[in-house]
Image (cartoon, rainbow, N blue to C red):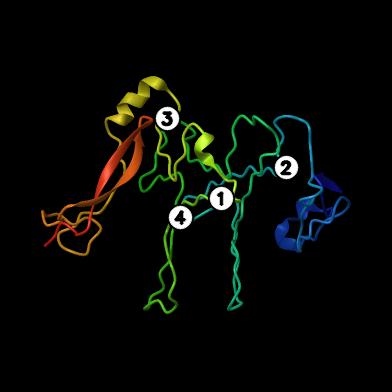
Amino acid sequence: MSFIGNLYLKAGIDAGFDKGMDFKRCGGANSGALLFGAGTSASPAATATADKKFVSLFTNSTATSGDSRNTYLRHYLSGAAGAGEALRAFTTINAVGVADAHGAHVSLNFGAATYSVTGQGIGLRATLHVPNAAMVAHGTYAALQAEVYLDGTSSDPRTTTEFSLLRLIIDGGNAAAQAKVLNLMSLVNIPAGSGGGQMYSPGTSMGTVEGTLRILVNGVAKYIPVYGHEGHS
């Protein structure tokens, strides 16, 4: 038997996953998982050894066409009032002064300086598929949502150093190279508009400023004016 954390895989891994290999969860707390799992919220699978991963998959594809994926998840919601996610990642802070923590960290990098991407090279891509028809259900749709959730009436982030809905930074990696990127980097990339009703609407008919949006520029509060009318007349 091969042991991975709290999971046992049926002997015969060399037969391959396409041979109907059976997954079983053996020992430890009941995770409540239908296929395989380990631990519960009250009794998680645990380790005190540094630099360990509970699940680790290193894969390599040498195919010269088509798409390859390390992990593919597809979850169908077939109940009219159901809800769910294909992936829910949750990191919980259980100590004072944890150095760094991320709910999820997704990276795209290059194995060598001479390697490149001829199309899109994007660290994280969020896609909202609109069906090939008028959307029936009324709801709120977005390709990306950044959310701050306040757990209770005592939730108060004012004691933090900085707090924002979205943080855009260029302060990682080589310091000398940062200046080159800063001379090229744009805050956002918005398609051009040529008339009314578009994301960018050029013109001079905006009227007076009705409010402002607070942002931080190098840690200093700045304010973007908000108008009550689009630029196009």
Residue 172 numbered mark, or none: none
Residue 109, position as x, y percentages in the image: 47, 37
Q: Which of marks 1 and 2 is nearer the N terminus?
A: 2
Instruction: Residue 150: give its label.
Output: 1
Residue 186 visible in rendering: no
Q: Which amino acid does label 2 sit on?
A: Phe
Residue type beneath disc 1: Leu
Question: Label 1: few (<14), some or many (≥20) within 10 Å?
Answer: few
Q: What kind of element bears circle 3?
A: loop
- In percent of the image, x 68 and y 42: which residue is there? 56
Q: Residues within 10 Å of mark 4 (few under 14, many from 20)?
A: few
Q: From this viewpoint, which residue is outermost toward the top?
A: 176
Of badges 1 and 2, nearer the viewer stands: 1
Give the residue pinned by disc 2: 54
The secondary element bearing badge 4 is classed as loop
Real-space Cα distance between discs 3 and 1? 43 Å
> Who's the residue at 32% across and 24% down the image?
179
**Side of 233 where 33 appears, left or right:** right
Q: Where is residue 158 in the image (x, y as percent from the top left)?
A: 50, 38
Q: In which quarter of the view is residue 25 placed?
A: bottom right
How far apart marks 1 and 4 lie (CA) works out to 16 Å
Q: Earlier in the sequence, mark 2 or mark 3?
A: 2
**Position of residue 144 measured from the top left corner of the image (x, y, whole percent):** 44, 55
Identity, as a three-letter code, of the amino acid under mark 3: Ala
Q: For the residue labelled by badge 1, is the local secondary structure a helix, a strand or a loop?
A: loop
Say which residue label 4 marks: 145
Percent coordinates x, y for residue 136 in the rendering = 42, 79
Q: Name the residue under label 3.
A: 113
Question: In the current view of this chain or complex, which residue is farthest to the front?
Answer: 153
Say which of 192 and 137 sits in front: 137
The answer to whether marks 2 and 4 mark residues whose Cβ atoms lie closer than 8 Å is no
